[in-house]
Image: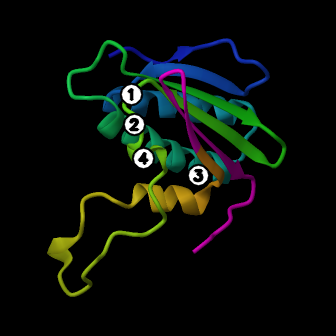
Amino acid sequence: MTGPSWREGHGDLISVCFCAEVGAVRAALIAVDASLQEKGIDRDLRDRAQIALAEACNNIVEHAYPVGDTIKAMIGLDIADDRGGLQITLRDRGLPMPDGQLPGIAWPAIDPDDPLTLPEGGFGWPLLHGMAQALCLSRQSGQNILRFHLPRIATHRQ
């Protein structure tokens, strides 16, 4: 596993590329947080960026790349400061999202009387929908491109 590879940005705060592996994602998120802190981004926005990026990147690792597909398994990340918050773009060359659509905002069913049935997954996309604005997915030239905006002030949507 190698660390993130910083790329020359085009007015971005951060432009980085890293392997689509759990350990590489974690290392990249730590480096991204340190970079955002150096650039004066406040703690609340950095914390929300960490949560949103962890959810999105881990979904790419788990679902976009077939097991063993390590040669092209990369994630590109660009973060720009647009005064109102952070504009985030993630790119990967993995499998397309089923039906080319983002998963919805519905939370997984939970039986409060039986905590042993708590689902292992299914919380990431509803969480991301709730935190982000202008969440959109496209596929261009074999690339998945996920874009979203994290506002400076947290919004809580239901």
The one nearer the camera, 32 or 147, is 147
> How far apart are labels 2 and 4 at the CA level?
16 Å
Residue 48, numbered label: 3
Query: What residue is shown with label 1?
Result: 94
Residue 25's x, y, as percent?
41, 31
List x then y, in percent, for residue 148: 64, 45
The mark lying in front, picked from 2 and 1, is 1
Going 62% across and 55% down the picture, which residue do you hit? 132
- Callout 4: SS: helix
Comparing 148 with 112, the one in front is 148
Name the kind of residue labelled 3 in the image. Answer: Arg
Q: Crowding at label 2, few (<14), some or many (≥20) Cα neighbours within 10 Å?
A: many
Relative to 14, 65 lies left or right: left
Name the residue tied to disc 2. Answer: 60
- Image quadrant for the C terminus? bottom right
Query: As displayed, is residue 72 above or below residue 51?
Result: above
Discs 2, 1 touching: Cβ within 8 Å: yes
Looking at marks 1 and 4 on the same chain, the residue that comes earlier in the sequence is marked by 1
Residue 43 visible to an observer of this rendering: no
* Magenta stretch bounds: 137-158
Name the residue furthest right: 83
User: Which residue position is annotated with label 4?
Assistant: 99
Helix, strand or loop at mark 3: helix
1 vs 3, front mark: 1
Marks 2 & 4, CB-CB < 8 Å contact:
no
Query: Which one is earlier in the sequence, the residue at label 2 or at label 4?
Result: 2
Q: Residue at x 59, y 52 (%)?
A: 48
Q: Residue at x 74, y 26 (%)?
A: 12
Q: Are marks 1 and 3 in contact (CB under 8 Å)?
A: no
